[in-house]
Image: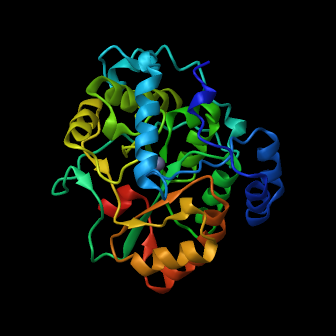
């Protein structure tokens, strides 16, 4: 339907996929791979290690495609999904969720947090809480493995989902919510939103918002811009117009998208994290899955509880 292979970034190498399988144990994972994983993306939220060339490349790709028309029309994600006629499409059956529970409740809407800046990069520094936030894209098996590891440790996480990823794996939206996690908007295609003109950038935000609304009844709790740590003033304004009072940044970059090994991911985060931190991590990488148990242990030893971003700020 809307899916377009040109938007795929790159598939992970077969060894990465094998490592993912080993690192994220469980028969369910093999099933998820068989169901058609899309492979891990190579670049992270900020465009990967080679920031300059990556920026240039993604900027050109974004402007050259011109296929964001499916969400054009000037209406916000809120408005375009309010007709109630789209509830029959893309909804998963209750039996599809990992927990086996029916997915009934409507997801929370974005909130304004008084006293917080438009762009939020961390929470209060004195409550013993941190938020692990994940770029939501890539292989569904590693996504599910991250969710399970977090839940095993009693941690809440925040998933910023890419719209096309939701098209490919619609049941994951409910799976995330049913686990008690936050679900948010990470643009429709995860291209360089900072380089787009107003119409294109707005369509990237509302394109994902529409999908979230269709799947969950809400445009998602958060918006995080794609391929940048910081939103431009234009993107902040467009996010607000689409229904998001804040944009979600972070103060700790795990660099997990560079696949440095699980130990390095844990070391990087534990070396930089402090009370109130918002940590940037990614679905789709075996290192992230493998790093999570040690990372969550290390946080616990420092009396830092991993909570959803909503909890962090509430
Ligand atoms: Zn991202």
Say whether residue 214 is left or right of residue 243: right
> Which of the 4 image quadrants contains residue 82?
top left
Percent from the top left, x then y, of residue 33?
A: 78, 46
Work out whether residue 14 or residue 146 is closer to the camera in this orientation and state it.
14
Instruction: Identify which residue is drawn at 44% across, 21% down.
Output: 68
Figure quadrant of the N terminus: top right
Work out whether residue 64 or residue 170 is closer to the camera in this orientation and state it.
64
Instruction: Identify which residue is drawn at 37% across, 16% down.
Output: 72
Instruction: Identify which residue is drawn at 25% across, 33% down.
Output: 238
Work out whether residue 234 or residue 24 is closer to the camera in this orientation and state it.
234
Figure quadrant of the C terminus: bottom left
Percent from the top left, x then y, of residue 285?
A: 63, 57
Q: Is residue 51 above or below residue 64?
A: below
> Which of the 4 image quadrants contains residue 277?
bottom left
Percent from the top left, x then y, of residue 117?
A: 19, 54
Work out whether residue 290 or residue 200 is closer to the camera in this orientation and state it.
200
Q: Is residue 191 visible?
A: no
Percent from the top left, x then y, of residue 175?
A: 61, 45
Q: Is residue 46 above or below residue 4?
A: below
Instruction: Identify which residue is drawn at 36% across, 50% down.
Output: 228
């Amino acid at each position: 339907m809307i899916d377009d292979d040109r938007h795929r970034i790159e598939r992970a190498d077969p060894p990465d996929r094998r490592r993912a399988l080993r690192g994220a144990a469980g028969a369910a994972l093999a099933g998820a791979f068989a169901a058609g994983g899309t492979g891990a993306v190579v670049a992270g939220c900020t465009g990967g290690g080679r920031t300059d060339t990556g920026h240039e490349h993604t900027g050109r790709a974004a402007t050259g495609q011109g296929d964001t028309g499916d969400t054009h029309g000037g209406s916000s994600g809120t408005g375009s999904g309010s007709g109630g006629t789209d509830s029959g499409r893309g909804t998963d059956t209750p039996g599809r969720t990992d927990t086996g529970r029916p997915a009934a409740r409507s997801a929370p809407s974005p909130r304004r947090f008084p006293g917080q800046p438009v762009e939020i990069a961390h929470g209060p520094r004195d409550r013993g809480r941190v938020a692990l936030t994940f770029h939501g894209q890539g292989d569904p098996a590693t996504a599910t493995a991250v969710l399970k590891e977090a839940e095993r440790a009693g941690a809440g996480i925040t998933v910023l989902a890419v719209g096309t990823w939701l098209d490919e794996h619609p049941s994951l939206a409910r799976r995330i919510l049913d686990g008690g996690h936050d679900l948010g908007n990470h643009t429709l295609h995860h291209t360089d939103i900072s380089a787009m003109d107003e119409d294109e950038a707005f369509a990237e935000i509302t394109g994902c918002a529409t999908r979230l609304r269709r799947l969950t009844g809400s445009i998602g709790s958060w918006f995080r811009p794609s391929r940048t740590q910081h939103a431009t003033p234009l993107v902040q304004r467009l996010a607000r117009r689409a229904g998001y009072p804040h944009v979600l940044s972070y103060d700790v970059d795990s660099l997990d998208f560079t696949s440095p090994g699980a130990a390095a991911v844990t070391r990087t985060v534990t070396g930089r994290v402090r009370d109130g931190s918002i940590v940037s991590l990614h679905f789709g990488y075996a290192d992230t899955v493998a790093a999570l148990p040690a990372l969550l242990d290390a946080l616990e030893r420092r009396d830092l509880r991993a909570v959803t971003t909503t909890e962090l700020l509430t």
